[in-house]
Amino acid sequence: MNLPQSPWPVSMVILTIWLFIVVGGGLLQVKGQPTQLSELIKNQIMFNVLVAIVFLIVVITLFKWWSQVGWKYPDNLQNLRLLWPPVVVLVFLLLTVINTGLPSTKVLMLVIVNTLMVGISEELMFRGILFHGASSSFGIWRAVWITAIIFGSIHTLNSLITGNFWASTLQALFAATFGIWTVALRVRLNTILPVIVIHWLWDCLAFLTNPFGDMALLPFALVLFIYGLWLLRNYRHGKVDSRSISHF
């Protein structure tokens, strides 16, 4: 298939269709009844997210964008050291989950499967396709903010499923900060694969520690947000010294 000359408008069309599948499919799955996301994830397979993943795989394959969206091994395995701050946070969350007790096997498996699908779907869409489109037209630094703001904003649409606009707004703020440090890792590692794993584990452990509330994750979110900005410091003016970003 012929590649589009400008991937940015194409990526926005893809985003629109993806949103229709995820949000529209979610509304169909809950039959229009307000449902908390934690309850949805813990009680049934999210088929809307599965369909969204299939859609993205088809699109990326047709456009031959697998390398462009970051579906490849890291260029330098030593740069995986950049993952240590989020890994420390994830270990802390894991210990918290173990200490407070695991849910039933059925609930645990549903949370693991659903959050894995969400991680794959959202990373392919935002840090993959959308970031490829935005960075091609606006450069890396602007693309970071564009994708993070859009990623945060679309989380307000969760209110259509939950019926709680204010909770969705808070989630949107968390998602925007999350979008900064995850795209920073995607840029510095030049791969999306470890970012998918980080996203999956973050969501999985966050849902399993849900009794503590989203505010319990605020300090971690802020620290990782600052870390993400630090990782991107050499991209701010559009000039990158490759020697300065190849080592941590």
Image (tube, helix red, strand yellow):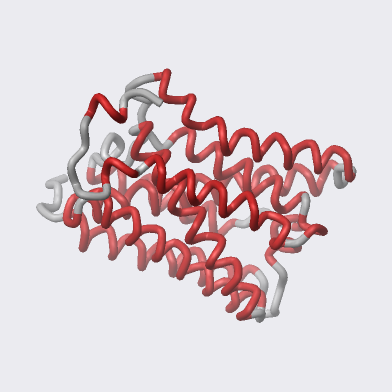
As drawn, 223 above or below 218:
above
Taking the spot 86% from the left edge, 47% from the top edge, the residue there is 103
* Residue 169 appearing in the image: yes
Q: Quadrant of residue 147?
A: bottom left
Q: Is residue 32 left or right of residue 210?
A: left
Q: Is residue 166 left or right of residue 17?
A: right
Q: Nearer the viewer, residue 37 or 96?
A: 96
Residue 159 locus on image (x, y percent): 60, 77
Residue 72 locus on image (x, y percent): 36, 29
Q: Nearer the viewer, residue 88 or 197?
A: 88
Labels in figure, total = 0
Taking the spot 26% from the left edge, 57% from the top edge, the residue there is 142
Quarter of the image for the N terminus: give it. Answer: top left
Taking the spot 47% from the left edge, 52% from the top edge, the residue there is 122
As drawn, 72 above or below 41:
above
* Residue 27 appearing in the image: no
Q: Nearer the viewer, residue 180 or 198?
A: 180
Residue 229 locus on image (x, y percent): 41, 48
As drawn, 201 above or below 16:
above
Residue 132 locus on image (x, y percent): 27, 48
Quarter of the image for the C terminus: give it. Answer: top left
Q: Quadrant of residue 197?
A: top right
Taking the spot 63% from the left edge, 41% from the top edge, the residue there is 201
